[in-house]
Image (tube, coloured by chain):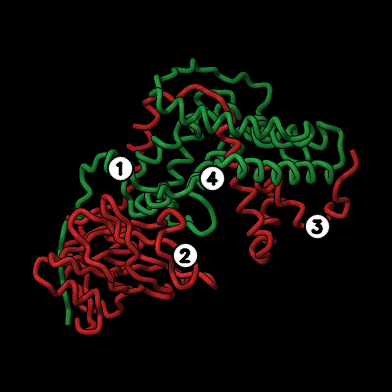
Chain colours: A red, B green
Amino acid sequence: MPSYYPQMASDPHSLLAPYALDALDHEEERSFEDHLAGCERCREELAGLREAAASLAYGAEGPAPPPALKERILTQARAERPNVASLPRRRSWTAPTAAAAALAAAVALGIGVWSATRPAATDPFASVLAKPGAKVVRMNGRGVVAVAPDGTAALALAVPKAPAGKTYEAWVIRPNAIQPAGVFRGGKGASVVAISRPVPRGSAIAVTIERAGGVDHPTQKPFIASEATS
Amino acid sequence: MTVLLTAPPPIAGRSSREMAHLSDEALLSLVASSDDAALAELYDRFGRVAYGLALRILRDDALAQDAVQEAFLAVWRSADRFLAERAKASTWILTLVHRRAVDLVRREDRRRGEPLERAPEPASPATAEDEAALGFERRVVQEALRRLPPEQREALELGYYGGLTQSELAERLDQPLGTIKSRMFTGLARLRDLLAQAGLEESLPT
């Protein structure tokens, strides 16, 4: 059979499909990854090809794994977990001036400690936290939500600037409803966003990426979501 | 003003049932904050597909288990590097599994001649729901593969399930490398379109 694209032989783009299938040797793979780093077109095309390649996994028939495998994986994972036991002692840190640093620390430490030096009047996150009975709810690895008993809430999230034409949109997820709760752009440091709707007990906050201006209903699954508030 | 507030994270003992409503991407973000219950839930969703894939590539139970274990631990260690904007979580996870399995099979290949130990394959009972869900996706993928021209299907299957590099494939099929590349590209692009048509893409329930 003749080659469809004879010119492909020397063109780095021609390695896209073999790369997506893990069909390159180590050297070819490294050199293609160098190309990939500077080629937006390849990265875009790769996303679709990778997805198709990964779906081939479903075509492989086989027995279920032995149940012991799951336990082995979880045991090993827990053994590797960063140790957070000593952290409360660091509560007296004195100079958490940047909100982003405090957020990153609180999240990295895995404890609900929030330190903010900005005045509550201008920082929605601090003003929610200043209310009696306010709580911090973790939002996966990248953010936290502050919720007060009166339903006011704010979100602090470290995400890169949204791509051109896109925006981040926050949602209040209740058992039977998903409501838009504000858009933001992301960027360096932590984005602090006042949630524009009341957040009742038992609801969660989620964030999706939507077209600029925001939408009424999420068009994709949230890439980040909080635990349910209590 | 300094606000200092401590609240223990309410995650201990959370059951997988409470995680059932979270998207794969949300689970992965939880994994990035060292939440092992989220890792368990991801394993429940993808462990079986992962093991089936690894077993097909490696044809050895113990090696397949190693590949799956290493891949899920890679998920655990590097979940924070996952960018939701670029890929679905399932794609990212299954790509990690595939890479581990292919690395292992290539390493084993270099030891060709040494007999591989074959452990018996202890199949555990899966729920009917599991079987049905997996069966559906399997049928869609197998049907899409069947609709590809045979030489494209062959290039995808030998590459993806066989763990062969493009050069090994060219040699084995006695074809120029450029031909192999274009078969892989055309086959994979076609597969992507067929799967999109088949509606395998998940959409948000409204």
Q: Is residue B8 above or below residue A17?
A: below
Q: Is residue A109 above or below residue B58?
A: below
Query: What's under tag 1, amino acid-wise?
Result: Ala
Q: What residue do we see at 34% from left, 38% from top? A: A74
- A129 vs A16, left or right, is left
Query: What's under tag 3, amino acid-wise?
Result: Asp
Instruction: Report in which chain the residue with disc 3 lies.
Output: A
- A66 vs B162, left or right, is left
Whether residue B138 appears in this view of the structure is yes
According to the picture, the residue beneath numbered tag 3 turns out to be A11
Instruction: Report in which chain the residue with disc 1 lies.
Output: B
> Which picture quadrant has residue A154?
bottom left
Marks 2/3 same chain: yes
Query: What's under tag 4, amino acid-wise?
Result: Glu
- Element type where label 4 sits in the image: loop
In the picture, the disc for residue A185 is none
Q: Nearer the viewer, residue A134 or B114?
A: A134
Q: Nearer the viewer, mark 4 or mark 1?
A: 4
Mark 4–mark 2 Cα distance, whole angstroms, equals 18 Å
Q: Position of residue B118 (x, y in %)?
A: 54, 17
In the picture, the disc for residue B37 is 1
Q: Is residue B90 above or below residue A114?
A: above
According to the picture, the residue beneath numbered tag 4 turns out to be B201
Q: Nearer the viewer, mark 2 or mark 1?
A: 2
- B178 vs A105, left or right, is right
Q: Position of residue B10 (x, y in %)?
A: 19, 52
Marks 4 and 1 close (CB-CB < 8 Å): no
Q: Position of residue B170 (x, y in %)?
A: 81, 37
